Image (tube, grey):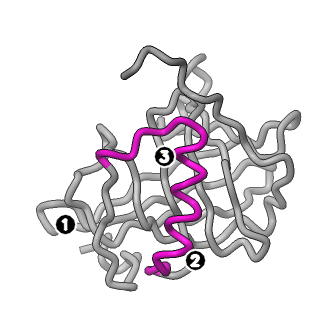
Amino acid sequence: MNGEQPAEVTSVEELDLSRYLGLWFEIGRLPLKFEDDGARDITAEYSLQEDGTVKVDNRCINEEGEPTQALGQAVPDDQHAGRLKVTFLPAALRWIPFTQADYWVLKIDDGYRHALVGTPDHENLWLLAREPQVDAGTEAEFLAEATRQGFELGRWIRPEQSGRPVDDAQLGD
């Protein structure tokens, strides 16, 4: 590093949560301590709950070839439409303070087909899409925004996407 402060991370000003809900394919990400670098067919599905929170259903095939699932909850930030707080703790432990992580939508296209999501500490970043692949121009546009906001993309991971999300039957095996 050259000693400069990284750029400030900013979320989108407006986010229509109802349009954001649904299934997203992970196109790329920075490495995560809780996800295998070699995981594939990674998806995130968001659905609105009766209490106004969002159910987060993350699924993938891990490095050992096993289907896995992580269920969480996201709480929208009433002051900033593009920001949510997410936890993957079991429901009985979600009351514990400081167990929610920032989940900020940094860029989204008008059709809600592609989204760049990150954390304000520059540690986590995801490129999500409604389809399992995106064209190089779209990826470049979204990653340019990540770079502008100070994210280091040298360790960027592009997981394999077959277009076949992990389904309930696979998880039940």
In the image, which disc is placed on residue 130? 2
Q: Earlier in the sequence, mark 1 or mark 3?
A: 1
- Labels 3 and 2 touching (C-beta < 8 A): no
Image quarter of the C terminus? bottom left
**Along the horizontal axis of the image, is 103 left or right of 40?**
right
**Along the horizontal axis of the image, is 122 left or right of 30?**
right
Within the magenta stretch, is there residue 145?
Answer: yes
In the image, which disc is placed on residue 66? 1
- Among all residues in the image, which is located at the extreme front? 2
* Structural crowding at the residue carrying mark 2, measured as other residues with C-alpha within 10 Å and reported as few (<14), some (14–19) or many (≥20): some
The residue that disc 3 covers is: 125
Give the amino acid type for the residue marked by disc 2 in the picture: Arg
Count the marks. Answer: 3
**Residue occupying the point 60% across, 45% down:** 73
* Structural crowding at the residue carrying mark 1, measured as other residues with C-alpha within 10 Å and reported as few (<14), some (14–19) or many (≥20): few
* Structural crowding at the residue carrying mark 3, measured as other residues with C-alpha within 10 Å and reported as few (<14), some (14–19) or many (≥20): many
Give the amino acid type for the residue marked by disc 1 in the picture: Glu
Q: Quadrant of residue 20?
A: bottom right
Q: Which residues are magenta?
A: 132-155
Give the secondary structure at mark 3: strand
- Among all residues in the image, which is located at the extreme bottom? 163
Q: Quadrant of residue 98?
A: top right
Closer to the camera, 94 or 166?
166
Question: Between marks 1 and 3, how big is the CA–CA gap?
Answer: 24 Å
Closer to the camera, 8 or 30?
8
Q: Earlier in the sequence, mark 2 or mark 1?
A: 1
**Residue occupying the point 28% across, 68% down:** 40
Question: Between marks 2 and 1, how big is the CA–CA gap?
Answer: 23 Å
Task: Give the vertical position of 152 relative to 166 (above or below).
Answer: above
Within the magenta stretch, is there residue 144?
Answer: yes
